Amino acid sequence: MGLNHVRLPKVEPIKVNSLTGLVDYLKSKFDEVFFEGCMVHVVSHDCVKLVSNILGDAGREVYMTAEAFAPKFNFGQWYDVESFIIAMQSCFVQNEDSAKILRVVGNIKEEAVKQTGDDGVSQKVTAKTGIATVEEVKVPNPVVLAPYRTFREIVQPESKFVFRMQQGPRCALFEADGGAWRLDAMWRIKAYLEEELGGLEIPIIS
């Protein structure tokens, strides 16, 4: 007859979509009886968990999960001009480079997108540059943008992107930082929680 590993009963974790929800829960001490030996684990750029220490069945209990709600932008996917403009305004923190892209895309004519150079980056497009002036305009590259990709309570990490255009016209952004922004976001989440939970003796790891 086989042996089965018996797991201890565990609570259903509370789920929130912000760091504020996690902070408010801990500060309220609503379930303080469980907090001894617990830890805040920054799992990723969009997930934080409040977990227990190791229990008698060698498992951990998850008391709360915070998962960031962020708009979806498909990097590496081609957008038509109208969809791209809407996405740039709704999915990104507006900065100098996003304004440059919007100026170019918003004034582009439906003519061939011309590529200059062989580096795969430099491009020129036919766009309006005045009330009645149309001429070739260089597409900015690389660009530094801050998409909404993590919790809104922290400053969204900026990273480099390659902005490309095709005939149609169509536009796309390609990530160019190797995913380093994820570590930056996790560091910022940890720093935010350390400041907000400074009065509570709860370890925070990332």
Image (cartoon, helix red, strand yellow):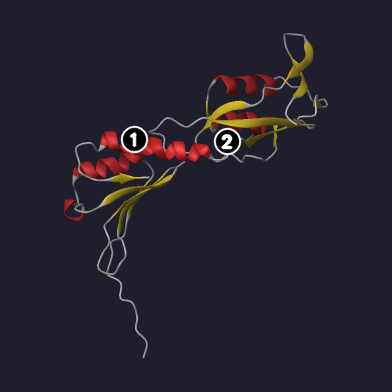
> Where is residue 59 shown, x and y percent of the image?
32, 65
Residue type pointed to by label 2: Asp
Front one among 119 and 63: 119
The answer to whether 85 is drawn above or below residue 63 in the figure is: above
Where is residue 161, by image quadrant?
top right
Residue 30 vs residue 74: left or right?
left
Q: Distance between the residues labelled 2 and 1?
A: 22 Å
Position of the C terminus, as image quadrant, is: top left
Residue located 37% across and 87% down the image: 2
Q: Residue at x 53, y 22 (%)?
A: 95
Tell me the number on the disc at residue 191. Answer: 1
Residue 66 horizontal side relative to residue 177, left or right? left
As drawn, is 22 to the left or to the right of 181? Answer: left
Q: What element carries label 2?
A: loop
Which residue is the extreme one toward the bottom?
Answer: 1
Q: In this view, does 154 lie above or below 45?
A: above
Q: Nearer the viewer, residue 11 or 160?
A: 160
Q: Residue 62 carries which label?
A: none
| Nearer-the-camera pick, 94 or 55 | 55
The quarter of the picture where residue 143 lies is: top right
Neighbours of disc 1 within 10 Å: few (<14), some (14-19), many (20+): some
**Label located before the other in sequence (2 or 1):** 2
For mark 2, does the 10 Å Cα neighbourhood hold few (<14), some (14 to 19), or many (20 or more) residues? Answer: few
Residue type of the residue flagged with mark 1: Ala
**What residue did someone put label 2 on?**
177
Element type where label 1 sits in the image? helix
203 vs 72, nearest the viewer = 203
Q: Pinpoint residue 54: horizontal percent, then vertical percent.
A: 27, 61
